[in-house]
Amino acid sequence: MQSEARPVPLLSYGMGVESSAILVHWILNPSSRNFDLSDLIVLTSQTGHEFSDTKTCVEAYLLPLLRAHGIRWVQIARAGHSMTAGYKVLDDSRSPETCHIGGAYKLGQELEAAGTVPEVAHGRRKCSIKSKGDPLDAWIDSELNGRSYQHFIGFNAGETKRATRDCSYSSVDRHSEYPLVEWGWSREAAQSYLKNVFGVIWPKSCCSFCPFAGGKEDMIQRYRVFPDQAAVALMLEYVAMALNPRMTLYSGKSLLSSIRADENPKALAIFNQMLATEQWAIYHWCPR
């Protein structure tokens, strides 16, 4: 049983390269951690728009390890538009079988209803706060009920500024820790570690319409493999631009122009099919 005097070890697990490398290293190298795996809580907030190759890797390589060691993985998601709706627990298990990337109330539902795309406000990504930060905080408050915890975050050694900013949110109860920074692991080192262990290139975790996901060419390549998810991103951008022509997914450049330039016929065909089945309306704007 977890001692009341000892902080609860909790990993914010985004399913991507960095947090996966931390989790695997903890499992395979006990000296890299100062807690028992039976005490660890792995916590994920699902946005509802993760690429399916992330699900494939998590289920094929991570979940067998979690099951073998009885590690608790909790998957949650927003339950509605406002956090007053709370969160929904998708799964809470020490023998997880499924990565529930479908979420509950999806981020795209909110963005499409508002006619907008992901934005940054005051240096912070509003979408991450609403779909990840707020539900995670709510679950932690409810589950731990004031108990102190070690909050492990997957910032790599090249993200010390992000770690420093996050550390400012530490409190009497929340003890922020950044294993990759401590180990001196870059993103490349984390990726290399996972490749050595599993023999695969671990995919980047992000929403299919994320404009912040590193090099945009990487996303364009991913859209070739997942044209359905490219079409969803195109539809989100289309609705936003119908209300504001400057509301492109990328700064100064639309996703549609990128997909056309890449000559991705499958994505465009699915997108056009979606447009053909949508209900249309005309709005007249009257300036005051």
Image (cartoon, rainbow, N blue to C red):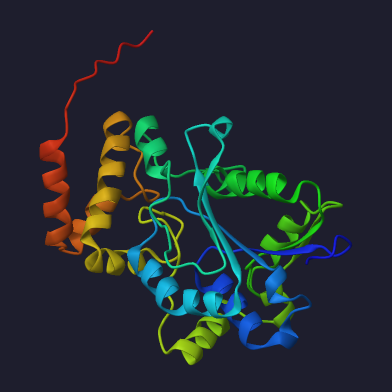
Question: Image quadrant for the N terminus?
Answer: bottom right
Quadrant of residue 109 within the rendered picture = top left
The answer to whether residue 123 is seen in the rendering is no
Q: Nearer the viewer, residue 47 or 8?
A: 8
Q: Residue at (47%, 53%) from the top-left corner?
A: 46
Q: Residue at (36%, 31%) from the top-left corner?
A: 113
Q: Residue at (45%, 87%) from the top-left corner?
A: 198
Quadrant of residue 72 within the rendered picture = bottom right
Q: Nearer the viewer, residue 165 or 22?
A: 22
Question: Image quadrant for the C terminus?
Answer: top left
Horizontal relation, residue 74 to residue 172: left or right:
left
Horizontal relation, residue 95 to residue 226: left or right:
right
Horizontal relation, residue 10 to residue 104: left or right:
right
> In this picture, is 217 found above or below 89?
below
Quadrant of residue 100 within the rendered picture = bottom left
> In this picture, is 115 found above or below 178?
above
Q: Residue furthest front?
A: 1
The answer to whether residue 20 is seen in the rendering is yes
Q: Position of residue 56 (x, y in %)?
A: 36, 71
Q: Position of residue 234 (x, y in %)?
A: 26, 48
